[in-house]
Amino acid sequence: MSGRTQAERHQVWIYLVAIGAGLGLGAALPEVQPAFRGLLWPALAALLYATFTQVPLVRISAALRDRRFLGAMLAGNFLAVPMLVAVLLPLAPADPAVRLGIVLVLTVPCTDWFVAFTHLGGGDAARATAATPVLLVVQIALLPGHVWLLLGPGVTAALPALPVASAFALLILLPLGLAGATEVLARRRRGAARLVARLAAAPVPLLAAVVFLIAGAEVEAVRAALPVVADIAWLFALYLACAVAIGVVLARAAALAPRPARSLVFSLATRNSFVVLPLALALPAPWQAAAVAIVVQSLVELIGLMILLRLVARLVPER
């Protein structure tokens, strides 16, 4: 059995160990936390580069023409999910800052590790990759409206400008461009072709590095969240279960093939915590609890996604 196969088979335990190690190191050596935050986005970019190299660019252009898939993605993420959040929000703590964090993180679909989890879960990484720029642009346009509708106009006024331009360049354009250049070189040079083959084994260790950095960088936020963890963690777990169910139903309604259907399920399950966390940290002091809610969501989501990797083949079986 190859090292790649072994890593993918035991990936749940690999990620759990990485989380524990990150939390332990971040707690024992608080001075490493700023360095971990600085390394997080480059690590995410490396993860996406490795994932994108496994997706021929010709398949991305074809995926963009798949209106049925993109329609299901947009309907699920920007119609069904906000309605789900509206149903769940009354169950959340009454603290406006906590509710703001819940709305910020749950109404924005993921545009980074969603692709990696789609790849690991047997989804269509080409379609997932093609959808990410569309998802990012639409969520930027709709997020203020979602906050206004779900929380009222007073909260919307507290939001600073979204710091997404750098995130888009680092997490989407840069790795996608490098992957395209690597693909072109792989057609001409054996060394580049060997690099692409070796990168097929990279997503699991790179994702482990990402979750290690998240845990180590945000250990203080996790500590601060302890008083409200029990009040919101179950809510995020309930969201994840409902989002997976919605994804399965939408995929069947749209008559998607198994691999695009799995991509849709992972899209609804994953949220863009890495992009909205800087926004929450930039809020005025009375709203800082929003960042705590986002950190809790990311940890609950990670555990849930590791379970979903085991279940997705049963939920969306090959026909």
Image: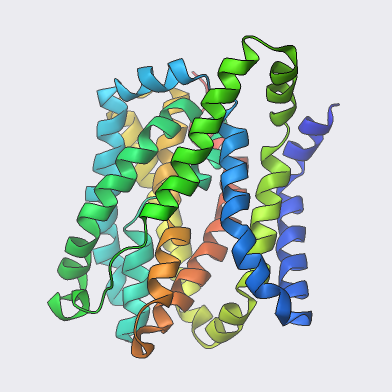
Residue at left offset 48%, top offset 63%: 237
State the image coordinates of residue 79 (x, y, percent, origin top left). 22, 49
Q: Give the side of residue 278 with respect to residue 159, left or right.
A: right
Residue 158 vertical placement versus 216 (above, below): below
Pick out the residue farthest to the top.
Answer: 188
Q: Give the side of residue 66 with respect to residue 118, left or right.
A: left
Residue at left offset 59%, top offset 27%: 53
**Can residue 93 be seen in this snapshot?**
no
Query: Which image quadrant is residue 108 in?
Result: bottom left
Q: Give the side of residue 220 with respect to residue 132, left or right.
A: right
Residue 91 vertical placement versus 267 (above, below): below
Q: Give the side of residue 254 with respect to residue 145, left or right.
A: right
Residue 238 vertical placement versus 44 (above, below): below
Residue at left offset 29%, top offset 53%: 81
**Can residue 167 be seen in this snapshot?**
yes
The quarter of the image holding the N terminus is: top right
Residue at left offset 70%, top offset 61%: 212
Count of marks overlaid on the render: 0
State the image coordinates of residue 84 (x, y, percent, origin top left). 28, 58
- Depth check, front residue: 226 or 311: 226
State the image coordinates of residue 77 (x, y, percent, origin top left). 30, 47
Query: Which image quadrant is residue 64 in?
Result: top left
What's the coloring here? Answer: rainbow
Residue 243 vertical placement versus 281 (above, below): above
- Depth check, front residue: 258 or 115: 115
State the image coordinates of residue 238 (x, y, percent, origin top left). 43, 62
